[in-house]
Image: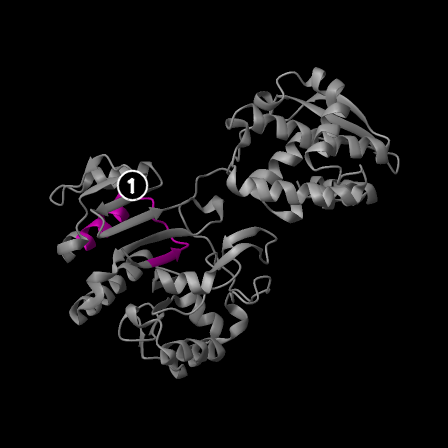
Amino acid sequence: MSYVHFSFQSTKDWGATTKAEDFLKILVSSGDIFVPERYGRAEPLKSAFDPVNIQSCAVFWSKNHGIMLKRKNIVWWIIDWYYKEHNLFNALSGGFDEKYFRANSSVARIIQIFKRIYLWGEMAYGCIYHWSDFEKKNVFDKLTQVYTGKLVRSSGQDLRWYLPGLYWANFFGPVYVEFFGREKFLTVPAYHKEELPDGGFLLLTAPSPLDYGHPEVQALEEAIMDHLGRDAFFEKARPEKLCRVPRFTFEQASLGRPIEVVAYDPVAEVIPDPHRFIQEAPALAEALIRRLRGKLDYSPESLKQVDDLILKKSYRRPEPWTRGEEGRQLMRELTAYYGEVLCRHLQGEWVVLESSGGTLHPTVVFTIGGVKQVEYPFARVDKLWEERVRADGLAIHYMLLQSGEWSHLEQHLKGLR
């Protein structure tokens, strides 16, 4: 079964139950397949949707920072909203069975409904596209590094860095009209263009989202990007391209305090006895060398190979400490090897210290430029494994430590705080 997907983003407030009710009323008033059957936060959806009494669904939306709504396998909606302090876009996404679009009346109806949804959400941007078109433009054949430094399978959807490309239906909010210039939209080539009530623009590239493969449609998409400015759009052929973006102002409701990011620290699961670990660290580092068949030699340069191993393994094995002793053993070996490189080249020594979260960590203490430094090897390995950003890798971090730049950066950040 193939699907036509949609993705819309906004910086406005979606958290109030009244806002939720307004969205649900759009679906109910549209009738037919747009009326959900069940709702919840994740599959399986346990709550039945009552189109006569939408209050309970709206309250669920408000309390759970969003909702998933579904009608069999025909259509689904996913809504996520955030507080102002998150500095993140609210997101509305989902999809329809492509069979629905085989009638011209259905296509026109979709456009009318999404114009209402666009205005409801005060969207910054939105698009509707066939999934196969998205795969062609935004999904890589293998893990690929993008502008942010992450190794990913797909990219282009984060408006903080770029627009995803041109698709069948493209909703540009006022922030983009100001960014590109209204004159650009008035003169842009398109199958259909329409100025929306809020000053935004809707651009269509074809009669239907099922026409994405036609050469004339693809040529029009390229012409639109050239006209508006290709330097604002993600391009699969240039994944590390730096793009121009508008200055976004997040206007959601305020939580009233800074967002506290409390990351789960699995060190106790992997290294329950840190004192014993630091005694075994040299042997554990040797075990990693054997695992990689002698390719490691404790040099700082060898940390690049360790980064490669982590990025490769982490793609298929998230949270390795939950995958049995084998996963925990690998994490111990990686931690030990990184720590041993620090000890050998920065004259460091292993000690056990308490982290800011109150857990005991095996750490390496050393001095650079007369300044005492403390590094938490397990935390560094875990961060790279979970977030998969090469810029946070062991090799780069070692270079910062060795040069003293990390110490300068920390002092700078303290001054800002």
Among all residues in the image, which is located at the extreme right?
A: 370
Q: Nearer the viewer, residue 60 or 133?
A: 133
In the rendered image, which quarter contains the C terminus?
top right
Residue at 48 percent of width and 70 percent of height: 179
Q: Which residue is mark 1?
A: 61
Q: Is residue 207 left or right of residue 91?
A: left
In the rendered image, which quarter contains the N terminus?
bottom left
Figure quadrant of residue 372? top right
Q: Is residue 368 left or right of residue 389?
A: right
Figure quadrant of residue 5? bottom left
Could you say where residue 165 lies in the image, as x and y percent from the top left? 45, 67
Q: Is residue 286 left or right of residue 210?
A: right
Could you say where residue 174 lies in the image, as x and y percent from the top left? 40, 67
Q: Nearer the viewer, residue 269 or 159?
A: 269
Q: Residues within 10 Å of mark 1 (few under 14, many from 20)?
A: many
Q: Nearer the viewer, residue 8 or 74?
A: 74
- Give the magenta part as a residue range: 6-27
> With respect to residue 174, does 185 lie above or below?
below
How many dots with numbers? 1
Q: Amino acid at mark 1?
A: Trp
Could you say where residue 15 lies in the image, as x and y percent from the top left? 34, 44
Q: Nearer the viewer, residue 345 or 64?
A: 345
Residue at 31 percent of width and 40 percent of height: 62
> With respect to residue 400, does 338 lie above or below?
above
Applied colour scheme: one colour
- Residue 397 seen in the current view: no
- Residue 343 seen in the current view: yes
Could you say where residue 234 lies in the image, as x and y percent from the top left? 51, 65
> With respect to residue 404, does 136 lie above or below?
below
Q: Is residue 86 left or right of residue 333?
A: left
Is label 1 in a helix, a strand or a loop? helix
Residue at 44 percent of width and 39 percent of height: 255
